[in-house]
């Protein structure tokens, strides 16, 4: 065994993870803390919801929040772009049918601009949904928690190590204030995953010794406007956010986090240290989606992650059409194999999850709102941050071509964020005179 094959042990990692309260299955401890109607701004049992980021997921999440049991209202919305903020009100109402009257957003509570988040949070809401591009998430989460709001935030929760640490720090305050924090890693609320991973943790396949995870598909939307159609470079990048790392973290963070998070969930358990990889190496590049309009992200990444028990995860994510597509996870144990979404096979075992599953996007809101109403502990923030870090670690490896430890990656002060946020501020990445953005070159690019 070479030294890089040795199981990793690290005091700093142990100390760091010791502070994280919640990991793994459901990531939601249910400990009664007592119900208090003063949790709600309106003084009754109505939960007033504010939406920040009024695109596809924000519209869906607002509808799901308003479909939970009990009195709940959407009272404020905010988006970088005014047309998105205005449009979401009717879109959410239209999707709710007979519950459409739960949308009660007064015109003065429709905000736009890069500071819209502060206005939504300060408008008297009880809970905010954070569904902007993830580069903004640490700032928005911290502001919401400091203002005493419950939060549902989409994944990933950060795109770099300073952002991950900012979320972890803000989440400590959330826990002190007994705020409820949901993170949009909805597989934790999907019956097939819950039952299968419970069986794996109960020993159905023995020790998990090898893992695979895939987000291979054709990619997402094409850039929405050209540079010439936008007034400033900042507007251009925020509008086409998927293709800029300070906003999206690359597609390994944006989408593949779901699959990495499932493997972390399988590997975690009583021993929180085991849940997150200790080091990784990888390769990747940009082979097909190479037009300058696609900014700076890669179109494929392969990462090999190593966990503290020496087991390894082979992870692929690809945005190239016409290839083998799969969004899935597989694990191999000493006694069998499993697809954690719902099957276990091996000598003497042939089990498939066969119950009807509720929509996990709805269940994650049902669970969060139930915790708010019952006053039970509910905080998915740390796991959201560490699974985001897992994806960031992968990108650092594929961009640099180096093997990088979790500890070195997590303590990194390399921030992707811009110095200031306004439409005429300079984004942290700039194109050359031909409109071409710098692309990472493994072996040359420094990431730490
Ligand atoms: N859990 C899931 O399965 C799932 C599915 C889809 C998207 N998502 C996540 O949801 C987030 C949003 O994705 P989407 O598909 O809705 O993208 P989108 O582009 O449709 O929507 C993002 C919205 O945020 C707005 N915005 C950008 N910067 C902002 C800022 N600083 N303040 C306020 N608004 C801002 C944009 O104008 C846009 O309306 C991403 O983090 C994504 O990963 C999660």
Image: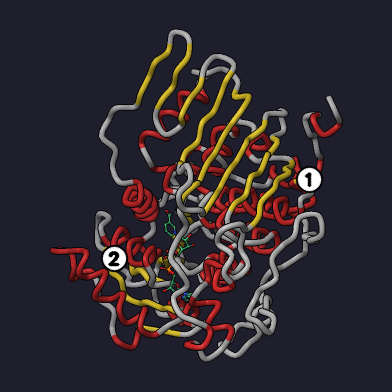
Residue 371 lies, in percent from the top left, at 39, 50
Count neighbours of disc 1 (C-alpha within 10 A) and say few if under 14, some if 14 to 19, many if 20 or more.
some
The disc, 1 or 2, on the residue closer to the chain's N-terminal end is 2
Q: Residue at x 69, y 66 (%)?
A: 439
Task: Say above or below: 340 vs 380.
Answer: above
- Judged left or right of residue 108, residue 170 is right
In-front residue for pair 223/346: 223
Quickly name the residue at label 2: 46
- Judged left or right of residue 108, residue 119 is right
Residue 160 lies, in percent from the top left, at 67, 61
- Callout 1: SS: loop
In-front residue for pair 338/227: 227
Quickly name the residue at label 1: 403
Task: Say above or below: 55 vs 310.
Answer: below
- Residue sticking out furthest to the left: 98
CA distance separating discs 1 and 2: 50 Å
Q: Is residue 50 visible?
A: yes
Q: Residue at x 77, y 56 (%)?
A: 411
Q: Which quadrant of the figure has residue 276?
A: top right
Q: Is residue 176 visible?
A: no
Quarter the N terminus occupies: top right
Task: Say above or below: 328 vs 231.
Answer: above
Residue 3 lies, in percent from the top left, at 86, 31
């Amino acid at each position: 065994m070479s030294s890089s094959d040795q199981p990793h042990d690290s005091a700093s990692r142990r100390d760091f993870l010791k502070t994280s309260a919640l990991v793994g299955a459901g990531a939601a401890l249910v400990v009664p803390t007592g119900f208090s109607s003063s949790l709600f701004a309106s003084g009754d049992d109505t939960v007033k919801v504010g939406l920040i980021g009024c695109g596809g997921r924000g519209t869906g999440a607002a509808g799901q929040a308003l479909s939970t049991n009990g009195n709940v209202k959407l009272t404020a919305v905010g988006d970088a772009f005014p047309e998105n903020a205005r449009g979401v009100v009717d879109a959410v109402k239209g999707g709710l049918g007979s519950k459409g009257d739960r949308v009660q957003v007064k015109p003065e509570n429709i905000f736009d601009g890069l500071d819209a988040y502060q206005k939504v949070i300060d408008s008297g809401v009880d809970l905010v949904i954070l569904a902007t591009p993830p580069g903004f998430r640490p700032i928005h989460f911290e502001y919401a928690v400091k203002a005493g709001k419950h939060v549902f935030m989409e994944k990933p929760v950060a795109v770099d190590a300073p952002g991950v640490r900012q979320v972890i720090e803000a989440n400590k305050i959330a826990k002190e204030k007994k705020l409820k924090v949901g993170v949009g890693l909805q597989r934790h609320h999907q019956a097939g995953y819950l039952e299968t991973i419970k069986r794996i943790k109960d020993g159905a396949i023995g020790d998990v010794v090898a893992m695979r995870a895939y987000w291979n598909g054709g990619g997402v939307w094409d850039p929405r406007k050209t540079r010439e159609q936008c007034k400033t470079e900042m507007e251009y990048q925020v509008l086409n956010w998927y293709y800029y790392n300070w906003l999206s973290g690359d597609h390994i963070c944006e989408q593949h986090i779901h699959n990495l998070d499932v493997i972390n969930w399988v590997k975690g358990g009583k021993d929180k240290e085991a849940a997150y990889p200790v080091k990784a190496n990888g390769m990747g590049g940009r082979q097909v989606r190479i037009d300058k309009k696609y900014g700076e992200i890669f179109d494929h990444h392969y990462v090999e992650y190593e966990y503290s028990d020496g087991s390894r995860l082979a992870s692929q994510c690809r945005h190239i059409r016409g290839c083998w597509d799969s969004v899935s996870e597989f694990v191999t144990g000493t006694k069998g194999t499993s697809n954690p979404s719902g099957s276990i096979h091996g000598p003497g075992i042939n089990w498939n999850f066969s119950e009807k599953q509720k929509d996990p996007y709805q269940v994650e809101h049902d669970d969060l709102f139930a915790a708010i109403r019952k006053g039970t502990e509910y905080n998915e923030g740390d796991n959201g941050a560490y699974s985001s870090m897992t994806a960031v670690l992968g990108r650092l490896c594929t961009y640099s071509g180096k093997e990088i430890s979790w500890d070195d990656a997590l303590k990194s002060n390399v921030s992707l964020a811009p110095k200031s946020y306004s439409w005429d501020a300079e984004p942290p990445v700039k194109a050359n005179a031909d409109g071409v953005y710098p692309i990472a070159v493994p072996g040359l690019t420094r990431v730490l």
